[in-house]
Image (cartoon, helix red, strand yellow):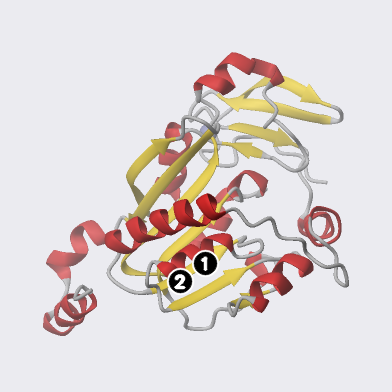
Amino acid sequence: MLAIEQCPVCQGPGDWYTDRGDYKIFRCTNCTLFYTSPVPDAEELKTLYRDEWSVPAGQTYIHRRKLTRAWRLGLRARKLRRLSSGNSLLEIGCGPGDFLRGARAAGFTTIVGVEPGDGEAEYARSLGFEICNQMFLEVDFADARFDVIVSRQVIEHVPDPIEFLTTAAALLRPGGCIMLETPCSSHFKARLAGKDWRYLWPPWHLNLFNEKSFAALFEKCGLEAVFFRRHLRKTYVTAVARLASDSCHIYDVGQHDAASLTAGNRD
Ligand SMILES: [Zn+2]
């Protein structure tokens, strides 16, 4: 386990907020992130997610099919496709491939999932998807780049959000976007629950974000927010961001790059 001395996003000081067993939860006085100390190291994290969280190898993953859920995820994938300039999508933490199915229905033609759980990865592969059955930071993407990167209910589990999101941002194509979805610490349900908020749940949940802490994270990772959306029914926030360099990119590119950008926008 690793002790965390300061906010893992903005490096600001934190006030003690509450305890969960041996874990202490702090609230950053600067960016308002809830962060945990101690956190699992890389090997402990791998053990947690490959052996305890996920369906182990050799056991069949039982998938609950919900038609309305598939329809809603397809709708969201369509919105992301309209925001980006191409047809490739990566999902980090794809589970059994629910969102990947939505992405396929939305017309994405290159679809890759990362999923450390063996049972979930096997199920997603059975649906015809290319799945990297590893922890995200261990995947060698070589020169693969993506127009859309999605990660739902993952960043709250990550000990070092800057390392995670910088690595993801490096896989984005110019003009692409990244969507993160996570429990929202400023949601009215979270405020009502206070210290009893069930998403304060180490060692599974280590960092809990809101719009302000997301903005601080994006700045550290060379991204800028496109929009935030709080969910009503679930205590979640969705954040969509793009490369900050995209803001000036359109004015900086040479003739060749401009042509390829235009070509990429034809869809
Ligand atoms: Zn902070």
Residue name at image x 67 percent, y 23 percent? 197
**Residue 64 in view in this figure:** yes
> Measured along the vertical axis of the image, is residue 50 above or below residue 39?
below
> Measured along the vertical axis of the image, is residue 12 above or below residue 40?
above
Residue 106, position as x, y percentages in the image: 38, 66
Q: What kind of residue is marked 1?
A: Arg
Left or right, 129 with respect to 25, comes to left
**Residue 170 in view in this figure:** no
Left or right, 143 with respect to 13, comes to left
> Where is residue 190, by image quadrant?
top right
- Give the position of the C terminus as an image quadrant: bottom left
In terms of depth relative to the viewer, which is nearer, 255 or 237?
A: 237
Q: Which residue is mark 2?
A: 104
Q: What kind of residue is marked 2?
A: Arg
Q: Which residue reaches farthest front?
A: 67
Disc ID at residue 101: 1
Residue 42, position as x, y percentages in the image: 76, 58
Residue 174, position as x, y percentages in the image: 30, 69
Element at badge 1? Answer: helix
Residue name at image x 73 percent, y 20 percent? 18
For the residues labelled 2 and 1, say whether their Cβ atoms are less than 8 Å apart: yes
Element at badge 2? Answer: helix
